[in-house]
Image (spheres, helix red, strand yellow):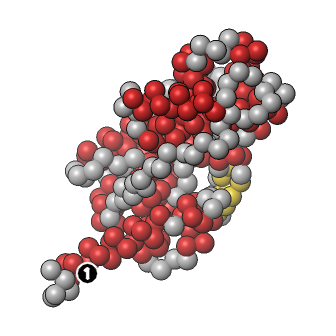
Amino acid sequence: MDSILDSFARYLTAERGFSAHTVNAYLGDVRQFVEATPALKGKAGLKKVDSATVRDFLMVLHQRGIGKRSASRKLTALRTFFRFLKREGLVGENPTTGISLPKVPKKLPTVLSEEDVAELLSFNATEPLDLRDKAIMELLYSSGMRVSELTALGLFDVPRESPELLVKGKGGKERLVLLGEWARLALAEYLEYGRPALLEYRREKIRGEEPLFLNRRGTRLTARSVERMFRKRGVEAGLAAVPTPHTLRHSFATHLLNRGSDLRVIQELLGHSSLSTTQIYTRLSIENLREVYDQAHPRAR
């Protein structure tokens, strides 16, 4: 079974373009299913799995109190796994066919107000790490890119004069994002004063492309480190809600929509393959309209 899972991991990475985080999550879900299914022993056991086996597994998860969102992800992982097995000729049919995903209530993403974003980005940046953090946050808010897209950037991916930046998103899809004046200024200061100082701490050779954003050791900054930095900056700014890189992505989209941007433009900038994914921000704007209405209209309450 280990060899099959290794092949599945390569398929997810090379052909589906999934991130390392998603691949690990899918593998964990499949391993949990394998361990919970006594009939699954080697390749021969795979052909014994039917829809009842999968439903029993989901029922056990439900009895253990696992939420609908987690159960939905596990079923998606199994569906992808058996689709891969069928393609490889290891099973005849996909046993997950016909099993519906649990209905998960849509949760509105957390969004900062324009004032909160301004407060978050208002810290003084003179030291190398401060210059780096300022450039990261300005870049994320200006472009709406994902933190994984940001940390994957190489030094020579950033044009010095152009307001456009080419990033590689989910599934290896490339798209152009736009950089505002404040983001370009923060990035220029980081490249001139911050990055060279961090580079001096490097004690190991870098394999592959030279990373744009560096950590304290002069090597590539990780998404997890960016998330920790956001928590620290959020506390310093005195924000009520702890911000994340994705909070800025949601705020980017919502603020554009509130100021009259077309939804399809926002879809393109975010790299959403479907407009329905982007439409959640219209719900956010309606919530904002309701709040303003309730506060301003003399007969709202």
Can residue 9 be seen here? The reply is no
- Quadrant location of residue 160? bottom right
Q: Is residue 264 left or right of residue 215?
A: right
Count of number-bearing discs: 1
Q: What element carries label 1?
A: helix
Residue farthest to the right?
89
Q: Is residue 173 above or below residue 279?
A: above
Indicate the position of residue 82 as horizontal and vertical percent values. Answer: 71, 32
Residue farthest to the front?
52
Frontmost residue, 191 versus 106 = 106
Indicate the position of residue 122 as horizontal and vertical percent values. Answer: 32, 57
Residue farthest to the bottom?
298
The residue at which mark 1 appears reads as 293
Q: In this view, does 258 lie above or below 94?
A: below
Frontmost residue, 163 versus 62 = 62
Frontmost residue, 276 versus 165 = 276
Q: Which residue is drawn at 56% across and 68% down?
A: 266
Q: Residue at x 71, y 54 (%)?
A: 174
Indicate the position of residue 22 as horizontal and vertical percent values. Answer: 59, 35
Indicate the position of residue 55 as horizontal and vertical percent values. Answer: 55, 32
Q: Residue at x 72, y 35 (%)?
A: 94
Q: In this view, does 295 lie above or below 3?
A: below
Q: Residue at x 19, y 83 (%)?
A: 300
Q: Is residue 271 above or below residue 76?
A: below
Can residue 47 be seen here? The reply is yes
Label 1 crowding class (10 Å Cα cut-off): few <14, some 14-19, many 20+?
Answer: some
> What amino acid type is highlighted by mark number 1?
Tyr
Q: In which quarter of the image is the C terminus?
A: bottom left
Q: In which quarter of the image is the N terminus?
A: top right
- Quadrant location of residue 119? bottom left
